[in-house]
Amino acid sequence: EQNLQRESCVGIKLYPGYNHVYVGDARFFPLYELAAQYDKPVAIHTGSTANGMGFLKYCHPLTVDEAAAQFPKTRFVMCHFGNPWLPDAAAVLEKNANVFADLSGLLEGLFDLDELFEENSGYFSLLRTWLGYAGGYEKVMYGTDWPLVNMEQYIHFMQCLIPEKHHEKVFYQTAKHVYHL
């Protein structure tokens, strides 16, 4: 609670897949209540894990729905847009007014953007589809997972992925709203 009282604290981050605890577990309830009390979001690692020690069942984006429904005054952020469970993440975003998503960690390392889009056109088409379904780009924000990715390349990747008319929302407005920047 002392950390949440600090102006420099922007929220709480949970790693359920690595900690082997569901987001809806009662042990997190006091954190959700404090996050609402101090008007700070709870960011949750959703989607695939970076190593074999994480358990996917705990970081599936549908687990966020349970917490979001029980704590409607708490803002939740699904980090990594639940990748690879894009339809499930989009459904959670669309259903819950208090849930947002960041687009961090979709890529790692250095890449050739043209080659990347050509070789993964099906994936990027699905990603665009489910981002659109999720209820608008005002619920989605830029993120990187730095230092696992080159910042300049990732920004350019996002600019190509997100329609230009939504850049202001994704690159600025959503994070400003969610994190009170």
Image: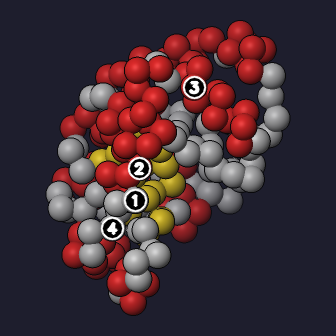
Q: CA distance from mark 3 to mark 2?
A: 16 Å
Q: Earlier in the sequence, mark 1 or mark 2?
A: 2
Q: CA distance from mark 1 to mark 2?
A: 7 Å
Residue type pointed to by label 3: Gln
Residue type pointed to by label 4: Lys
Q: CA distance from mark 4 to mark 3?
A: 28 Å
Q: Earlier in the sequence, mark 3 or mark 1?
A: 3
**Residue drawn at point x = 52 percent, y = 63 percent:** 15
Say which residue label 3 marks: 159
Is residue 89 at all visible to an observer of this figure? no
Q: Quadrant of the C terminus?
A: bottom left
Say which residue label 2 marks: 175
Say which residue label 1 marks: 181
Horizontal side of 170 relative to 146 (left or right) equals left
Q: Please provide percent x and percent y for residue 18.
A: 58, 63
Say which residue label 4 marks: 40
Dots 1 and 2: beta carbons under 8 Å? yes
Q: Earlier in the sequence, mark 2 or mark 4?
A: 4
Q: Please provide percent x and percent y for residue 73.
A: 18, 62
Please, is residue 152 above or below residue 42 in the view?
A: above
Q: Nearer the viewer, residue 68 or 153?
A: 153
Horizontal side of 154 relative to 132 (left or right) equals right
